[in-house]
Image: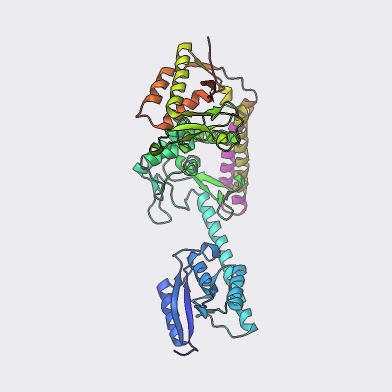
Amino acid sequence: MSNSIKEVCAYIRVSTDKQEELSPESQIRLIKEYAQAHGMLLTHIYTEEHGISGKKADKRPAFQEMIAACKDKSHPYDAILLWKFSRFARNIDESTYYKSILRKKCNVDVISISEPIIEGMYGRLIEMVIEWSDEFYLYNLSGEVMRGMTQKALQGGYNSNVPIGYVKEKGNDKIPTVEPESALIVKRIFDMYVNEERPLADVAALLNRNGYKTKRGGHFETRTVAYILENPFYIGKIRWNYYDRQTNRRKRAEDVIISDGQHKPIISEELFAAAGERLAKERLKSGYGKKRPVASTKHWLSGMMKCSECGCSLGYGAGNPKHKVSPHFQCWKKGKGLCCCYHSNNISEAEAIEEVTSILQELVDSGCYFDYDFSLINDVGTEKKLLQNELKRLDAKERRVKDAYINGIDSIEEYRENKKILSSKREDIQKKLDNTKVAAQPVPIQKEINFEKMIDLIHNENTDYITKGNALRDVFDHFVWNKEKGEMCAVLNIHVKPLK
């Protein structure tokens, strides 16, 4: 083989936009013809999956694999063949960076078979002009697409893949329809979170335990459940432009578009609002010192028992039958030499359950009642913040309605009608806000606790540990174990008080 034959690779990518361009097969055919005509040996073809954007190099696995191969000391390629320079990158900064590395450090040229460039400085200048033109086209196209999708969302159209619970036929004008089986999953999620008052982690764990899958066939996570609970699509609304995938953050409320959709709702507005209210309260209360959800623990008593010496939680150990070690709880600080107690403050699982049962039995005999203070749950301050956020969202909607009129999208009649609707909503919210300022203190309700039922529950082998853990946490804040004295003390939740 002659030393003058260049060994080359090819890089194939099809754009995400709808421009007229060649298919991967056509690009490969033309590159092979070019290599043969120029006496080049094509030894490898790197192909991105269809639809991967050329805007970010770190999002293109085939591109990164090709660059890594070119950097190898074995020098496998003398050049990279492309159908067009736009296939290499649609970001001028990244294109310049990678081409500089390839040409100066790796001695690998980058060649466009359909855009012949002369050698030397003028050739490089022409190449840069082509790339600048491609990048300008990309950003201009993105702006046009964004404007079109925004207008579609304002008119109740849907731009993305439909969420779980719905299906949509191909075609931009098709309206999503309810998918009965997956819609039941959505209803079950709202029911568990709002009516059964289960934590997000417990909802996800129970869905996975029952074999349910997400829209993409994966397992449910707390963030997946939260996304469903917050998605207004389930009450017949369209939400658009609420998340920035570049920064992985939600956009400002005034930038988010929410409009009436054309599809049927699965969830009532009242249930959706209740879920949103609970999510808001939990986020306000989240922070250091909050108990882990039962679903994320190894035992239904995990996180509930504290060391009498240092106050830290007793960690659960599953034991080891081979070494005759039974399941137990132990102060985790003692194991690290951080607890000041002289003895090992541990307790076997069986003894812990016996101690908790004993405490429950004492409460059965005492006739304890709930002194349930609704002021702890229906926080007026929280409600006020939610209403104020609603007013801010209305401000944003009013600006968009005005912009639609100024830009000629809506007529003066449509503008007046939309403004009238928003003004009516503003009045309703303002009335609720005024009422929260003078709201009377809620009257506590006393409700008897069925501790006998709780005893039966924790001893029932057919009851899952999530149900046991949540039942216990509804009444108790924690237990304190003192091994030296051999006693367990209970600390009730703040809204549970024994009454005579």
| Place of residue 390 in the rendered image (x, y in percent of width and height, measured from the top left) | 59, 37
Q: Residue at x 60, y 68 (%)?
A: 94
- Percent coordinates x, y for residue 183 in the rendering: 38, 41
Please determine whether, in this image, residue 197 is positioned above or below residue 225: above
Residue 38 vs 55, above or below: the answer is: below
Q: Is residue 11 visible?
A: yes
The overriding secondary structure of the stretch rendered in magenta is helix
Q: In this view, does 322 lie above or below 99?
A: above
Q: Give the range drawn in magenta.
A: 403-430
The answer to which quarter of the image holds residue 71 is: bottom right
Residue 180 within the magenta-colored segment of the rendering: no
The residue nearer to you, when weighing 56 against 169, is 56
The answer to whether residue 316 is left or right of residue 405 is: left
Residue 405 x, y percent position in the rendering: 60, 50
Near-viewer residue (297 or 50): 297
**Residue at the (42%, 34%) spot, across then down:** 325
The answer to whether residue 337 is above or below residue 359 is below
